[in-house]
Amino acid sequence: QVQLVESGGGLAQPGGSLSVSCSASGSFRLNGMGWYRQAPGKERELVAVITSGGTRIYSDSVKGRFTISRASANLGVYLQMNSLKPEDTAIYYCHVDGLTSDNEYLEVWGQGTLVTVSP
């Protein structure tokens, strides 16, 4: 069983910075880790993902402002958010996908952490 623990987030002013991190525990073969977000009244959307090979993919709305990286031991992911805008306000969800020891696909979502950008 894979579990995710998220931390970070909080309140920042426009132009400020915040970070969120996520660590995974359990036995599985990691494919990718990433962050999605859901703003009030909107659908969940991709923010950034990093594959097991190190490829980084960002949404156009955060390119050049957010940086995703893997934490040590390869079972954690970190999102540094700079030059924050009010439209970045959302609940940020960690997402992991991979294969179990039986080669079955799995994906796991974190519980979500709130990021608020406001003057």
Image: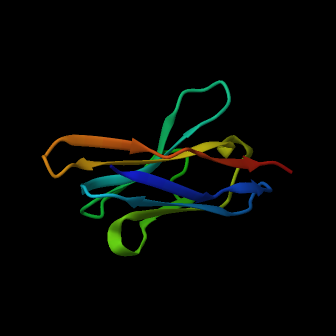
Q: Position of residue 53 (x, y in %)?
A: 24, 63
When asked about the image quadrant of residue 12, the answer is: bottom right
Q: Residue most toward the left?
A: 102
Look at 50% across and 36% down and name the residue there: 45
Residue at screen point 39% across, 75% down? 72
Give the x, y percent position of residue 23: 45, 62
Residue that protrudes farthest toward the right in the picture: 119
For the point 67% across and 59% down, the residue is 83
Q: Which residue is most to the front?
A: 1
Taking 28 as reference, is 37 left or right? right
54 left or right of 89?
Answer: left
Q: From this view, report whether residue 91 is shown above or below residue 6.
A: above
Q: How many marks?
A: 0
Q: Nearer the viewer, residue 26 or 117?
A: 26
Residue 19 quadrant: bottom right
The quadrant holding residue 11 is bottom right
Q: Is residue 108 left or right of residue 15?
A: left
Relative depth, front residue between 108 and 89 = 108
Query: Which residue sits at x=75%, y=49%?
Result: 117
How is the model colour-coded? Answer: rainbow
Residue 101 in percent (x, y) is at 16, 52
Residue 78 lies, in percent from the top left, at 49, 64
Q: Residue furthest bottom?
A: 72
The vertical placement of 94 against 90, above or below, is below
